[in-house]
C-alpha cells in the first residue's frame, strides 16, 4: 500500500466517529495492535524525549526501508505511535522525509491532545525525520 493510501485510510477511519470519546477509544484500540516491544529496547537510548509518558522507538533499516518498533506506557501515546507506525513503517527514508504527518491536524487530533502529548508527538515527528535524513545521506 502506498503511503498516500495509508494516510487516506487513517483519515477515513477517523471520519466514522462523531465524538472525541469514540476517537480516543479507537486510538487506544489501535495501540493494542502494536507488536510487543522487548524490554531490552526500553532504554534511554530509544526513548523519545519531550513526552511526559515513556515512548520508545527503535528504527531498523531493511532493504533500504525503515522498519519501526515502538511502545509506550501510556495507552493514548501507544495509539499515537501506532498511527505513525502504520504510515511510516516499511517506507524509504526519502518517502518519510517527503511525507510529513499532517494528517494529525487534518483529523483534528492535534487540537485535542494536551500540551505534553502534543510536545511528545512533535518530538516523535522530529526524531523520525532526523533518522530518515541521516539514513538517506548514507
Image (spheres, rainbow, N blue to C red):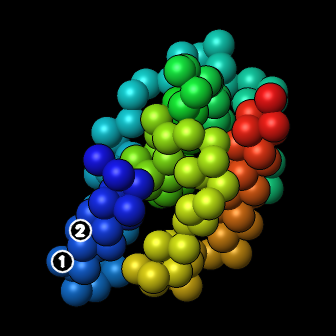
Q: Where residue 72 appears, x then y in whole percent?
A: 56, 41
Residue at 70% x, 43% y: name it.
Answer: 132
Query: Which of the 4 image quarters holds residue 8?
Result: bottom left
- Evaluate whether residue 71 shows in this view: no
Quarter of the figure with the C terminus: top right
Residue at 63% x, 42% y: name it.
Answer: 93
Residue 120 horizontal side relative to residue 108, left or right: right
Residue 121 horizontal side relative to residue 9, left or right: right
Identify the mark at residue 45; answer none if there is no mark: none
Crowd rating for badge 1 (residues with CA inside 10 Å; few <14, some 14–19, many 20+): few
Residue 108 horizontal side relative to residue 6, left or right: right
Q: Where residue 4 appears, x then y in whole percent?
A: 38, 62
Q: In this view, does 100 lie above or below 2?
A: below
Real-space CA distance between mark 1 and mark 2, rounded to the nearest whole angstrom: 6 Å
Look at mark 1 in the image and give the residue it sits on: 16
Q: What element carries label 1?
A: loop
Look at mark 2 in the image and give the residue it sits on: 13
Is the Cβ of the residue at disc 1 closer than 8 Å to that at disc 2?
A: yes
Residue at 24% x, 73% y: name it.
Answer: 12
Q: Where residue 40 appears, x then y in whole percent?
A: 65, 13
Q: Is residue 4 above or below residue 18?
A: above
Residue nearer the viewer, 95 or 19: 95
Q: What element carries label 2?
A: helix
Residue nearer the viewer, 63 or 124: 63
Amino acid at each position: 500500500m502506498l503511503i498516500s493510501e495509508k494516510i487516506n485510510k487513517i483519515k477515513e477511519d477517523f471520519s466514522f466517529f462523531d465524538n472525541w470519546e469514540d476517537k480516543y477509544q479507537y486510538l487506544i484500540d489501535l495501540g493494542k495492535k502494536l507488536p510487543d516491544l522487548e524490554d531490552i529496547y526500553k532504554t534511554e537510548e530509544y526513548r523519545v524525549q519531550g513526552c511526559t509518558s515513556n515512548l520508545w522507538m527503535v528504527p531498523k533499516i531493511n532493504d533500504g526501508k525503515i522498519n519501526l518498533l515502538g511502545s509506550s506506557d501510556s495507552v493514548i501515546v501507544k495509539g499515537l505511535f501506532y498511527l505513525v507506525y502504520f504510515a511510516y513503517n516499511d517506507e524509504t527514508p526519502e518517502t518519510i522525509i517527503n511525507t510529513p504527518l499532517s494528517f494529525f491536524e487534518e483529523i483534528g487530533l492535534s487540537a485535542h491532545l494536551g500540551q505534553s502529548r502534543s510536545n511528545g508527538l512533535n518530538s516523535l515527528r522530529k526524531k523520525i525525520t532526523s533518522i530518515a535524513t541521516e539514513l538517506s545521506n548514507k
